[in-house]
Amino acid sequence: MLNWIKRTYREHKNKVVFSAALLAGIIAFSENLVAFGSFINTYNPFSEQNSSPPIDIGMPISEVEVLLGQPQEIDFISRSYFSHGIEVNPSYEYQDLVGGITVKKLPSGVMFKGRVDGISLNSSVDDIKNTKGRPTYWGVESDGKAVAIWYAHDLLTIVNFEPDKNNISVATSITHTESASIVAYRSILLSIFQELKAGRVSQFAKEFEARAKSTVLPDGMLTLESFANTYLHQKYQLIAMKPALMGGAELYVGFGDTLLYFWIYPLSWKQPTLRAIVDIEKFHKQLEG
C-alpha cells in the first residue's frame, strides 16, 4: 500500500501539489470570508449584533406581550423572557408602561446579541468606555465583580462586569432604565458606598445627609458618617430586596453579623435617594424600650 502511494505521488506529483494548494486556498478563503463577514456585520446597522431590543421605555406592557408573548417569570422588579434573554422592568410610577430593559447572559447560554443604549454583552470595559465615555459611578463589589453606572436626563445605564475565562472583565448584564425604577436601586446603593470610599457624598445621598444633620436620630438609625466609620470597609452581602410599604425599595445588607436596612425612595417620582440606614437589631431593641 505504501509503495502504491509513493508511486502514485511520483507519477502525479504536479496534480497532487496543485490539489493540495487548491484545498489550502479554499480553506483560507473560507476563513477569510467568515472574518470578512464578521467585519461587515460590525458596521451593518441591520445586522443582529447591531439590533436593539424590540421594546422601548414608555411602551405599554400590553404591546410588549403582543411582540414577545407572555413572560416566563414575573416578580416585583421584572417580567422575564428567558427565551429572548430580555427582562422588561415596569415603570415605578406607571406599572402598565415599560420603565426599563435588562439583557443578561443566562446560564442556559441564551443571550441577546444586539445592543442596548449602544453597547452589547461580552464587551470589555474599554470597549464600553469608548462608546459611552467615563461612567458617572464605578465600583468593585466585595466578590471582585464590578458595576458601572451612567446617569443622564433621568435615565440610568447600568453595566455589570465579571471576568471571563481569560480574566478580562466583560459585560454580563446591561440595564437601561428610568432612574426611579426599582431595578436600579441595588446599583445605586453600591454607588453610594463607592463614593463614600472616595471621600465624596453621592448625589443619591445628599438629601439624606442634609436631613440627618438637622435631625436627632433614634438609636439604631445611622447617619452617612456613622455608617462609613463602622461598616464601609467591611465585606458585605446583599441579603434581600423588596418593595417598601411607603414607596421605593428596602434593601437588606449583611456586614458580618450585623444586618442593615437601607431605604431608597424616588423623590418627585424621578430622583432616587437614600432615605434611611437602620441597624435592625439596635432599632428593635430601642422600640421595645
Image: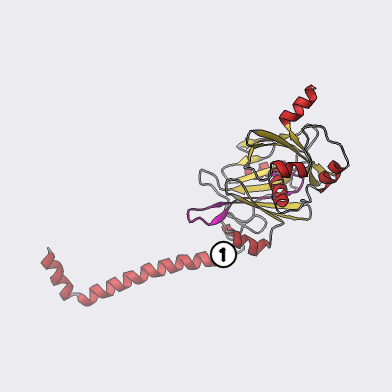
* Residue closer to the observer: 278 or 77: 278
Q: Tell me the element at label 1.
A: helix
* Residue closer to the observer: 27 or 153: 153
Q: Which amino acid lies under the numbered mark 1 shown in the image of this protein? A: Thr
Q: Residue at x 67, y 56 (%)?
A: 117
Residue 33: name its quadrant: bottom left
The quadrant of the picture occupied by the C terminus is: top right
The quadrant of the picture occupied by the N terminus is: bottom left
Residue 198, x across and y down, in percent: 71, 54
Residue 183, x across and y down, in percent: 69, 43
Q: Residue furthest top?
A: 288
* Residue closer to the observer: 125 or 112: 125
The image's colour scheme reads: secondary structure
Q: Is 182 one of the magenta-colored residues?
A: yes
Q: Is 109 one of the magenta-colored residues?
A: no
Residue 160, x across and y down, in percent: 62, 50
First to last magenta residue range: 160-184
Q: Is residue 69 visible?
A: no
The residue wearing badge 1 is 42
